[in-house]
Image: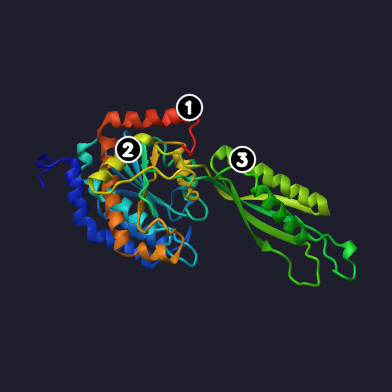
Amino acid sequence: MNLAQITPHEYIGTRIKALSRRLWEVSLELHTHPELSYHELRASTVLSEELASAGFDVDRGGAGLPTSFVARAGSGDSPRVALILEYDALPGLGHACGHNLIAAAGLGAALALRDLLPCAEGTLLVVGSPAEEDGGGKVAQVEAGVFDGVDAALMFHPGVHNWSWAPLTAMVEMRITFHGRAAHPTGNPDDGIDALGTLIQLFNALTELQKSTPNGSHVQGIVTEGGKATNILPDLAEGRFCLRAMTTEALDELVRQVTHCAGKAAGATGAEVTIAQEGAAYTHFQSNPSLTEAFTRHLTRLGIEATEPHPDVFLGSSDIGNVSTRVPTIHPFLRILPPDHSDHTPAFAAAAGDERGRTAMLAAAEALACTAYDVLSDPTARALAWETFQERRNRGLEVAE
């Protein structure tokens, strides 16, 4: 095709149409064979091989993550755009978060852009990022420098709304263990320290704490160890707790409050308590207004209107937040189910594998590719992305805004 006869955006649309069948085959390959966090060997292989076949240089296993990869194409270090691919699934539910669609959309955007790179300066990165659901692959990649020098990090997420950006909260998991002393519950109960009873006291305290936490803050816990027999006071009890808050600063305060509650429960019974963070902490997501506007504009061309999120609605947490604190980032939602549904359900997994998911994936691929081209080809677009990024950082702008 003669690129002189059509605009780059028109060329991208033509390429996405030509690639649509293969992109959907890749999406269904991942959907049919879901893999859990850190075990996405099949998905990372399929995706990286598609990119290598298209002329990308692919490095696998970076940041200490065997199922990660970074594919590169282009002619220099700067400007630089990163398309982010997620591909881990959920235990028992498969791709009920639609990561197969995220991966295929990012792949499609990369393939559509490949032939346009000689017309734009810089480098296109395709970042295969594992373990979003449990562990935080992007956190490790940020710390390893994968996003250093990147002018825009771009991805989309399927959802139940067409929203231009994602109201994602900060999150951390804590493992709290109480060490007591075993005893017979009727023979010598006074000699024992009931670790499980102490853990239950903590749960009760957290129920009360929840009543006074600010909007967007939440604590959810499960018992992971509670004893082995009913005729022994447990000398060990353990709980795992997920803490979320509207901002990273609010999360720090919530961690302090939960730690205080655990200490009080231990002090009341005489148990010892140990507290450990589980995995990486996710910061709250900070959308880039300039890039968001560009992506939304390209969606509008495709007949999809994306709006601002509803006030006071929060959609969980993601390690994309950690990327957004370092470089200009977008994470819009495209609907594959009506608003009265939710992800992480069997119905969402089904939609991620049928025509509803396919339609959203192809639209996202085109809009992502067009946004990436804008950043690579237009110094003004890059400057505006960094200007709005720095403005939000200087003003301390939070997720609620």
- Please determine whether, in this image, residue 98 is positioned above or below residue 228: above
Mark 1 or mark 2: name the one nearer the start of the chain.
Answer: 2
- Please determine whether, in this image, residue 206 is positioned above or below residue 247: below
Classify residue 175 as left or right of residue 158: right
Which residue is under mark 2? 293
Where residue 392 sits, quadrant-wise, is top left
Closer to the eye: label 2 or 3:
2
Q: Secondary structure at mark 3?
A: helix
Q: Position of residue 72 (x, y in %)?
A: 32, 45
Q: Secondary structure at mark 2?
A: helix
Q: Position of residue 385 (x, y in %)?
A: 35, 32
Which residue is under mark 1? 394
Residues at discs 2 and 3 in contact (Cβ within 8 Å): no
Q: CA distance from mark 1 to mark 2?
A: 21 Å
Q: Position of residue 389 (x, y in %)?
A: 41, 32
Q: Secondary structure at mark 1?
A: helix
The answer to which of 335 and 329 lies nearer the viewer is 335
Marking on residue 252: 3
Closer to the eye: label 1 or 2:
2
Mark 3 or mark 1: name the one nearer the start of the chain.
Answer: 3
Classify residue 168 as left or right of residue 266: left
- Residue flagged by tag 3: what amino acid is it? Asp
Mark 2 or mark 3: name the one nearer the start of the chain.
Answer: 3
Q: Position of residue 155 (x, y in %)?
A: 36, 47
